[in-house]
Amino acid sequence: MTGALSVMHERRPLLSVRDISVSFGGVQAVAGASFEAGAGRVTGLIGPNGAGKSTTLGVVAGAVRATRGTVEFDGVDVTRLPSFRRARLGMIRTFQLHGEFGKLTVLENLLLAAPSQVGETVRGVFSPRHSWRRQERELVAEARELLERFGIADHESAYASDLSGGQRRLMELARALMARPRLLLLDEPMAGVSPMMRDRLGEHLLEVAATGIGIVLVEHELRFVEQVCENVYVLAQGSVIGEGNMRALREQAAVLDAYLAG
Amino acid sequence: MSSAWQFYIATLVIYSFVYIIAASGLNLQFGVAGIYNFAYIIFQAAGAYCTAVLSLGNPHASGSFQSYILGLSLPFPVPLLISAVFAGLLGVGLGAVTIRRLRADYLAIVMLVISLIATDVVTDATGLFNGATGLSLVPQPFSSLTSSTTAYNWIYAVYAGVVCVIVLMAVRTIIRSPLGRSLRSVRENEHAASALGKNVVGLRLFVFGVGGAIAGVSGSVLVSFTQAWAPSSWLYGETFVLFTALIVGGVGSNLGPVLGALLVPVVLAEGSRYIPQFGSPTLVPSLEWIVIGIVLIAFLWFWPRGVVPEPKRIFPKSWSRAAAPATLFEDDHAPQRVGSR
Amino acid sequence: MQSLVLYIGFGLVTASILCIGAIGFTLQFGISNLFNLAFGATMTLAAFIAYVCNAAGLSIWVALVLGTVAASLLSYLLNRGLFVPFKGRSSNLFAMIMVTLGVGLVIQYSIEGIWGATNFSYNMTQGSSEHFAGMVFTNTQLVVIGIAVAEAVVVHSLLRYTKLGKAMRAVAVNDRLARNCGIPVRRVVDATWLLSGALSGLAGVVLVMDVQVLNSNSGSDFLILIVAAAVVGGIGSPYGAMLGSLVIGIVGEISAGFVNAEFKDIAAFVILVAVLLLRPTGIISSVASAKEVAR
């Protein structure tokens, strides 16, 4: 490898997860999983049900405590950091289920995500110069643009709990982008979304990545994974049993065995 | 209007303001942040006791028949301000309990028990606040302005009203701000809130502190008027009455606690005065509680959000960018619409 | 040392009354996932029904049975008529607690409205005092302990050896799974409320027999100790309730003896809060963990 390529390979990955283990009660949910995700790329995490994908994502996000292992984000060891601090560093996750704020409107869901809001501090709230209103106007405009892009602008004033499953997925994606992420952790973002939309969203994710954001994607829809992910890790029974791009993986026997559903 | 009537009306007005203040504080904790603080009344008690022992004179003075701590004869408005801070700090201390993640109803029971412990401790430790007998002869602020009790009541009503308006404005400011939105997000889904960078524990402690301070203010205003305060003034049933007031008036809105405070403690409690006595002497006061219980259950069934529920936030159409942005779904394969509202 | 043993004796009596109530309370939580704070009110009602029968000339033991039956029926009706419909509406646990509190208030103050706020007592004798190994009991207290032990044995046999009992355990841990296994969940729930309601009535009457004072607050004052016993022992587990009752009853009486009478309650509360914060699922945590009371 020469020049530029070798520099790229030496650059530190945005996310480095090493040797994560998680056990609940007597069950070993994750057993020594390791993977990396780079800025500007989409990395996939696939595997059969119960393989520990969501749990691993939870560990990365800080929602699940690992019994062993480390998580490094842009060179910073965040293993001990609570999830809200990781989010403030730019690590933003979506949820497979129940990720929405039900009794807040769709627009409010997005506004919440914006970081560094003046109006969220006590001083900012009571300051007589109403500076938070100015920021709020801009955030509303930005959020409306995002909603428009994802095609759910008409629902901006609907309660999030009134949306259909697919619409909620789109809202969560828009919300995650609103949070100015540096790393996106997406937990089955395409569940309940129609195939046509999936293709569009896949392209959009690639555009988002191209702006320098790293994306980790947990997904079941393998065609989607193939379309979007540069690098894919296969999880089974709590550890990584394969890595590479989808085409190469399809040929590895071990992967085929573990993954009966195509 | 006769002097007796004026006296009564002014007193009613003062009690109304006190209840509105108390309900607003609980609204911030329960309505906005979703915290089931079943120990809320102890913060009102903290404010009342604090104001009492700061305004009263030395407990060891000759002729004194009450035993209590402090007794600094501080002039108005010092006791009010210190009480607010004290109750607020107590609130933050209690809020630490929620760090232990318990199921909602389990947590409510923890709070209820803490409330009972507080009552028992204060009743037993007679040196603190004069035990079960409680404190009396608490000095009234600005009593030198007039010697007529009727006039004084009106003056006090103005004072209570000013405090009430300040509290309502402060709470309204918080509710409508992005901070209020963060609090609501913690109520709706604390995991998602955390995942978006909200410090859930910090936000809860904040709400405990502010709600506690507001409760303390209500206690201070009340005790400086009634001049007496004992454990019987703050049994856990009072917290229940405030929750009912919120559930009836409206949870999470600005107007809800005002309406609820007027409807439940004031109308129900005071209204029963006008029902002619019938049956045994305890029948009518018992009826009050029976009606409160039935009203609560009826509202929880038919109108759980209350008369004035939390309004939906709509933002001005003008807050948009000029150019129409590109959508991902150009050719009208827009996501299915849910039934419009 | 002598006083310690004496207080332990008092503790056994309190623990017995607690045991009857705590098992009932915990069964209701287990089967319906609900903290029924109206439990104290049903206790009071049973005690008053027993009082009326007793004052009309019936023996206290007959009155006991009548009070128990009344509480059993009332509890069954409350569940079918109120708790089940509310649960079906939404899964808001806090609203459920408020509903039970509301019902409790209505019952308690109806009692106060009818009979007034004075104290009453039963027409009965406490019997002579017996001495056992440094502890002192009246005859009545010995009977109370006997009733508690008998009741614990009956509940244990029911849960362990009968089809109904096993069905109750299954529904408590996972009602959907139980339904899929063909268990008639609705009937099991009804049976549990009849049984636990009977226990609340029994506890109410027996309580008044021991403390010899009855008023409209009797049940609700005692309820918090019952909750403490059930939670400390492990909410949802009847065996936990038995253990918790011993802990709360004995520790409470020892505190009351060595410090002062009010400390009985404070000691119980402090233990309860400590358990809720440090090990919320209690001593026997199986059902509590299944219901995820703490995360």
Image (cartoon, rainbow, N blue to C red):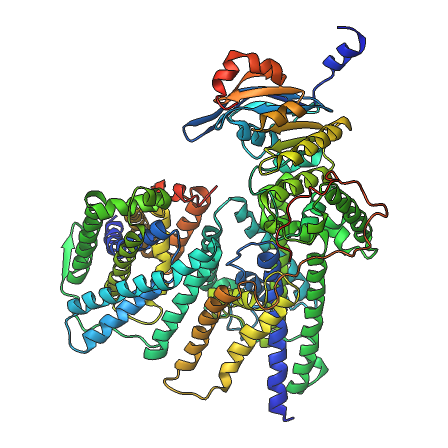
Q: Nearer the viewer, residue B14 or A7?
A: A7
Residue B33 image point, x, y percent: 60, 54
Q: Nearer the viewer, residue B68 or A127?
A: A127
Q: Nearer the viewer, residue C124 or A77?
A: A77
**Residue B130 in sight here:** no
Q: Quadrant of the C terminus of chain B?
A: bottom right
**Residue C206 in sight here:** yes
Considering every residue shown, the one lying at the far right of the view is B322
Q: Nearer the viewer, residue B17 or C103?
A: C103
Considering every residue shown, the one lying at the far top of the view is A1
Circle count:
0
Residue A225 image point, x, y percent: 62, 25
B257 to A262, vertically: above or below: below
Left or right: where does residue C17 sit relative to residue C105? left
B280 to A237, vertically: above or below: below
Residue A245 image point, x, y percent: 63, 17
User: At 52% across and 77% down in the image, what residue appears?
Assistant: B268
Residue B153 falls in image quadrant:
bottom right
